[in-house]
Structure formats: C-alpha cells, structure tokens
Amino acid sequence: MMTVDEFRARFPILTRRVYVNSCSQGALSTDVDEAMRAYLESWHESGSPWEMWVDEVERLREWFAASIGAGADEIAVMPSASAGINAVASALSFDGPRSHVVIGDFEFPTMAQVWLAQERRGASIRRAHASGDVLPIDAYAAAIDERTLVVPATHVCFRNGHKTDIAGLVKVAHDRGAYVFLDDYQRTGSGPIDVHALGVDFMVTGCLKYLLAAAGIGFLYVRRDLIERFEPTVTGWFGRVNPFAFRIDALDWPPGANRFETGTPPVPNAYAALAALDLLDRIGYDVVGRQVDHLVERYASAARDAGFVVRTPSDRARRGPLVVVQSVDAPALVAKLAARGIIASCRGNGLRVSFHAYNNDADVDAVISALVAEASLLERATATAR
Ligand SMILES: Cc1ncc(COP(=O)(O)O)c(C=O)c1O
C-alpha cells in the first residue's frame, strides 16, 4: 500500500501551492497526466481504436463499482451528475398516488433544478428546511409521507460542509415507501462508502473533485432490484442492449444500469478517471478517510480556537472533507489567500477549505496562519457562540 507521503508526492502542484480546493477540483496527479497522454498516444497511433476505448470505459465501470461496494451492472457511466439525475427523473412518472419530491435546503442547485423541471410532468416539490447550518432528519420526516416518490439528498453540502445522516434518511423514507437519491459528489473519493449497506436507491457522483480526475464524467448507481422497473425517456444508442446493432425500429432495454446511458461515452475522461481510481486504490479509501478526518479536525478546532465562526458541524459524523469558515468578504479573502500561495474557494461569504489525503498538517497550519494574518476579513465568534 502507498503511504500518504508517497501519495502526496504524485501531485506536483503541492510543491508550489497549498492546495485546499478539492471541493471544486481535485489536484492533478502525475498518474492522471500520464493517462491522458496515453489516450492521445492511442489516438495518434491507431487512429480510431474504439474497441479498446469502449473496453476502457467498461473497466472504469467495474473499478468504480468496486470502490463503492456495488456491482458493475448497477453503474451507468455518465457525462455529468446532472445527466444521471435527469435520466432517473425521466424514468419516473408523477401521475400516480406518489408525485411529491422532497428537497432539502442543502442541495446543489442542479439537484433541485432537475426536479423543479419535472413540475411540468406532474411533480410537486416539498421542502425539508434547515435550521441555520444544520439539517436534521426530523426536517425530512416532517415532509415525507405516502405521497412522496423520491427524496434527493446531498451527502455533504457544498456550501457549509454539513453531512446528512443518509442511513437515518433511508430509514424514514423507506418506512414511508419513498426512494432516496443520494448526491455523493462532495464526498466520493474522500473515504470509504458501501452503497448497499447504506441502502440508497440511486446515487450520482462525478470525477472532478475528490475522485481526482477531469470534468465531463460521472456515475449513476441504481440499486439492482430497481433497475428493470425503469425505462428513461432521456435515452440514446448507448442505452441499448447492443448499441452496435444500430436499430431504428424499436427500443430494447439491457438488464443493467447502462440502460440509463445515452450517447458516446467520454473516453478521454474515462482514461483520467481510471488512473485516479487506481491511485486511490493504491493508497486505500480507509487511509484517505483517516487522513481527511485528522486534517478536518485539526483545521476546524484551530479555526474555532482562533475565534473564527466555523459553520461546519463539529460532530465528526456530521461533516465530510469540507470545512466552511464565515468571512465578511469571502471573495476578497480567497484573493488574499491566493496571494499567499493558498488555493481555496468560497460560496457566498463562506470560505471553503477542503482536504484530501495529499494534504498534511503543514497545509492546515499554513491556512490557519494566513487566516490569522487576514483576520479583519473573518467574522468573529461571540464568546457564548464559541
Ligand atoms: C454536490 C454536487 N452535486 C452536483 C454537482 C454538479 O455535477 P455536474 O456538473 O457533474 O452535473 C456538483 C458540482 O459542483 C456538486 O458539488
């Protein structure tokens, strides 16, 4: 197995920058760099090696499935998380007794927007409201009933780092006959997950954040026993039993989740994603999870001790790899940090600092020192709030 130091050494940017922005884009490893060059080389060399390219996509399907405890037949390789959500939404009907979609306040916009777009097809959106930066399962329980069809839920919130109790949500939703559709994008790659044990019905994620690859590729997981219930109307030739049968007279549906796919797969991105999954496998998701948890704790407690307002929950079970500290002018703070060689990001006035296993204690300490130096741009906690 690879150590965290060996892992870190594969990311050249870390010799030049403190990189704490994996919640936006994972850092580029030499492995992914080489894989993308290998794709270009195969194109130069062979011109149109489509059989090999399609095989690479199948290899990716298997690797990703194994990384979340699923079977390859439960995975659709998609060009984005949005495409995965749309494919599922298009397969649901809202004209039966269940037409409600319960959306929590912490969703990434695309998750809310795809379901809002289904209102024209009969869907009715209900909301689960947060109290401040906390979204308890009780808020979902108050909104889910026998009219609820699906509950889309982000695992980690992109805005404040709150991690929802998905196992608790699955219990409430399933007791009332509703599906749970997990958006794991802000967590996948930052530690282990077992989708079967978690019990979600659908899950989407993508490769450009903690999965350490490029834009333009993601995954949809559909629980095996549900797959054959659904025939998406957002479809295409790669959603067929055999795309290369080139049929225009009828639709057939493969038994696997590949029925949710549409067009030609994003081959260059599949090369990048395979290399990144291989690298993550070599360090191991447990090791990644432990390192991320350690860094998050070090950073969040130092930020609190410095008197800053940490919006992310302090309970380890309720947070992921992202910690959000409240600024009075976060875009200005991000620019000040960049001038100090620290790459972070913001949403609203929340400063987002996120960790992967390639980060270390020195990164945390560098960010904290920079925040102390720029303290005029940070909101201060009142003594009681601390
Ligand atoms: C939680 C979450 N869901 C979904 C997305 C969007 O994914 P895509 O652009 O692949 O549709 C993002 C991207 O930032 C995200 O953070």
Image (cartoon, rainbow, N blue to C red):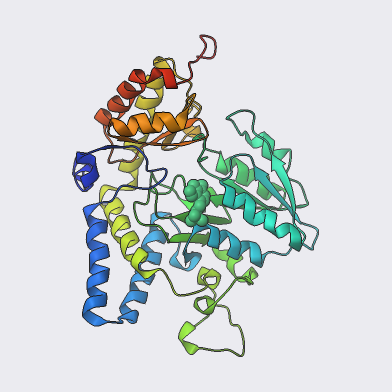
Counting from the top left corner in percent of width and height, residue 176 is at 72, 48
Task: Check the image and report above or below for 216 versus 244.
Answer: above
Q: Residue at x 63, y 50 (%)?
A: 112
Counting from the top left corner in percent of width and height, residue 248 is at 58, 89
Task: Check the image and report above or below for 382 versus 223.
Answer: above
Residue 287 seen anywhere in this rendered image of the structure: yes
Q: Is residue 314 left or right of residue 52?
A: right
Task: Check the image and report above or below for 244 versus 349.
Answer: below
Please count the marks in the image: 0
Q: Residue at x 28, y 26 (%)?
A: 366
Q: Residue at x 52, y 80 (%)?
A: 237
Q: Residue furthest top?
A: 383
Counting from the top left corner in percent of width and height, residue 139 is at 68, 36
Counting from the top left corner in percent of width and height, residue 206 is at 44, 55
- Residue closer to the observer: 43 or 9: 43
- Residue closer to the observer: 289 or 361: 361
Q: Residue at x 56, y 57 (%)?
A: 202
Image quadrant assignment for residue 89: bottom right
Residue 222 seen anywhere in this rendered image of the structure: no
Image quadrant assignment for residue 16: top left
